Amino acid sequence: MSDSRFGRSIRFGALVGLALGLGAAGIAGAAARNQAPQAAIQAPVGQPVDSFPILSRLHDWQVIDDKTVIVWATPWQPYLVQLKYPSHDLPFVQAIGVTSFGDRVYARFDSLRVAGFRYPIDNIYKMTKEEAKELARQT
């Protein structure tokens, strides 16, 4: 191989390596930017509880993201409900349902019903009215 060909192939290899390195850095930076808003949502607000009481039906609910909902069991008591799996229909539905055992909804046992599908409840957090309103306002 002549020296000029060898020099061109080294330059080409360096250029390809540089392009791949910049591409990987760009992807990593984009992933970090996409996860930054989720970090605030993933940090649970309130104290963890195993269940919450439900009299006959939910008073109100607000979607935070496709895995998190603020559920108002009464007009005075909100709960943050995290689902085990994301529901991509959740931000768009007009009504949700919740399974219950007796007069209580349990984490890791009951489910949220969204568009005919059941999504198991992973965690429940008891919130104050102010925490719920602030979290809903942020989204």
Image (cartoon, rainbow, N blue to C red):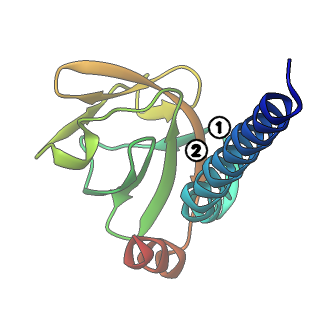
Relative depth, front residue between 70 and 32: 32
Given the image, on which type of amino acid does mark 2 rest?
A: Ile
Marks 1 and 2, how far apart at CA: 7 Å
Which image quarter is the N terminus in?
top right
Relative depth, front residue between 104 and 93: 93
Farthest-out residue, left: 94
Is residue 12 rendered to the left or right of residue 134? Answer: right
Farthest-out residue, front: 2
Provide the secondary structure element on which disc 1 rests. loop
- Rendering coords of residue 57 (x, y %): 24, 43
- Rendering coords of residue 89 (x, y %): 23, 36
Is residue 116 rendered to the left or right of residue 41? Answer: left
Relative depth, front residue between 115 and 106: 115
- Which label number is shown at residue 50? 1
Q: Residue at x 60, y 55 (%)?
A: 35
- Which label number is shown at residue 124? 2
Q: Residue at x 58, y 55 (%)?
A: 30
Given the image, on which type of amino acid does mark 1 rest?
A: Asp
Q: Residue at x 32, y 44 (%)?
A: 55
1 or 2: mark nearer the eye = 2
Relative depth, front residue between 32 and 78: 32
Instruction: Tell me whether circle 1 and circle 2 mark residues in contact (CB < 8 Å).
Output: yes
Q: Residue at x 63, y 46 (%)?
A: 23
Quarter where residue 12 is shown? top right
